[in-house]
Amino acid sequence: MNTTYFFIGLLTGVSVSAFFIGKELYKYYTKYTIQKKQLDRILKLNDRIKKFKVA
């Protein structure tokens, strides 16, 4: 009986830890992709400004 409770507790702990780690990784991923999109927009705008100044 003791080992059953041990394995249930172990499984629960691993599941909860995996949930919070996944949550943090997803938060980092979304932040990174949003920053990448913003950087791409700024670089595209910068290229347009350079073309406008040259012409």
Image (cartoon, helix red, strand yellow):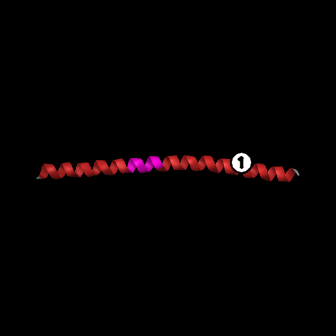
- The location of residue 55, given as percent across then percent down, is 11, 53
- Dot 1: few (<14), some (14–19), or many (≥20) neighbours within 10 Å? few
Q: Is residue 16 left or right of residue 25?
A: right
Q: Is residue 29 found inside the magenta-colored segment of the image?
A: no
Query: Which residue appears at 27% of the width and 52% of the height?
Result: 44
Q: Is residue 31 found inside the magenta-colored segment of the image?
A: yes
Residue sitting nearer the eye, 47 or 4: 4
What's the magenta bit mostly, secondary-structure-wise?
helix
Q: Is residue 42 left or right of residue 15?
A: left
Query: Which residue appears at 41% of the width and 48% of the height?
Result: 34
Query: Which residue appears at 49% of the width and 47% of the height?
Result: 28
Q: Is residue 34 left or right of residue 54?
A: right
> Which residue appears farthest toward the right when viewing the image?
1
Tag 1 secondary structure: helix
Magenta-colored span: 30-36
- The location of residue 54, given as percent across then percent down, is 12, 52
> Which residue appears farthest toward the left when viewing the image?
55
Q: How many marks?
A: 1
- The location of residue 43, given as percent across then percent down, is 28, 50
> Can you identify the residue that label 1 sits on?
13
Query: Which residue appears at 57% of the width and 47% of the height?
Result: 23
> Which amino acid type is shown beneath numbered disc 1?
Gly
